[in-house]
């Protein structure tokens, strides 16, 4: 069974600074997809970024980028130039057979 | 605008009542899911469907039931609500294939008193 681990329950970052959220996963599959989702307080969960395991190039979406280390089974998210609107719970997720497996989440707090 | 809708947004109901949480999507997605999100924010898959007349139980055992009579509609029913059912319920949908992310609804926060 696949498992996804987020070891940081909460991370705090100042506006305009950079924060990195860690995620590790366990799998015996060679082809899979990884995602980061953002859940703002009392709002809809939205997809932040997606990574295909067979692609070595790290995905980037504006201020969000990932560091994908397939051999280490690590998938961290970097938020650059943090903004107040980035405050949310962030979930790492793994998809191999059509069902997403989520980590326990990391709460990101952004301070002015 | 293509989206996924959940109603009601909040529900407070007495023990023993029957409730149905509604979920509809306008994207034509074949796959739909129900997640239960506990107070610690962890997400647990309780039901999923890969198409009309297809429903499966998820990883977390749940007393709820689901149906999929139409592609766009995936309601969740609790025949007799209990305080232990108090939680946030999230509905999601996706296209076929493993590379697609999910689109989530805004959730239903259920409180059983």
Image: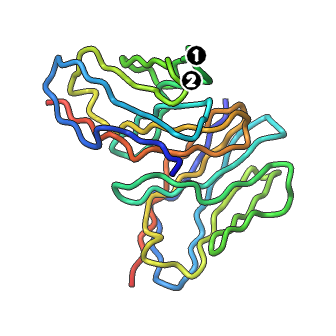
Give the residue drawn at x 28%, y 27%.
B85
The answer to whether residue B17 is left or right of residue B72 is left
Characterize the local packing of mark 1: few (<14), some (14-19) or many (20 or more) Cα atoms within 10 angstroms.
few
Dots 2 and 1 on the same chain: yes
The chain under label 1 reads B
Q: Position of residue A104 (x, y in %)?
A: 49, 47
The answer to whether residue A39 is left or right of residue A96 is left
Give the residue drawn at x 23%, y 18%.
B18
Q: Give the residue number, with chain letter if any, for mark 2.
A: B49
The answer to whether residue A71 is left or right of residue B74 is right
Q: Is residue B35 above or below residue A68?
A: above
Give the residue drawn at x 21%, y 35%.
B111
The tag earlier along the polypeptide, 2 or 1, is 2
**Quarter residue B30 falls in:** top right
Q: Which mark is residue B113?
A: none
> How many circles with numbers are drawn on the protein?
2
Q: Position of residue B67 (x, y in %)?
A: 46, 17
Residue reaching furthest to the front: B1
Q: Nearer the viewer, residue A88 or B12?
A: B12
Secondary structure of the residue carrying tag 2 is: strand
Separation (CA) of disc 2 from disc 1: 5 Å
Secondary structure of the residue carrying tag 1 is: strand
Q: Give the residue number, with chain letter if any, for mark 1.
A: B54
The chain under label 2 reads B
Give the residue drawn at x 69%, y 49%.
A34
């Amino acid at each position: 069974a696949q498992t996804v681990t987020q070891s940081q329950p909460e991370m705090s970052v100042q506006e305009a600074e950079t924060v990195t959220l860690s995620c590790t996963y366990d799998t015996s599959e060679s082809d899979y997809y990884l995602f980061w989702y953002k859940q703002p307080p009392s709002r809809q969960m939205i997809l932040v970024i997606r990574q295909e395991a067979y692609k070595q190039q790290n995905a980037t979406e504006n201020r969000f980028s990932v560091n994908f280390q397939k051999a280490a089974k690590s998938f961290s998210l970097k938020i650059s130039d943090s903004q107040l609107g980035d405050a949310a719970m962030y979930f790492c997720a793994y998809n191999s057979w059509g069902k997403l497996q989520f980590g326990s989440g990391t709460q990101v707090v952004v301070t002015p | 605008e293509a989206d996924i809708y959940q109603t009601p947004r909040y529900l407070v109901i007495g023990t023993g009542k029957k409730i149905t949480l509604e979920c509809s999507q306008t994207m034509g997605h074949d796959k739909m899911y129900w997640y239960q999100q506990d107070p610690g924010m962890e997400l647990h898959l309780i039901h999923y469907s890969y198409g009309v007349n297809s429903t499966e139980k998820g990883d977390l055992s749940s007393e709820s039931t689901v149906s999929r009579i139409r592609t766009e509609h995936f309601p969740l029913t609790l025949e007799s609500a209990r305080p232990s059912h108090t939680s946030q319920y999230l509905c999601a949908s996706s296209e076929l294939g493993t590379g697609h992310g999910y689109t989530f609804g805004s959730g239903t926060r259920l409180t059983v008193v």
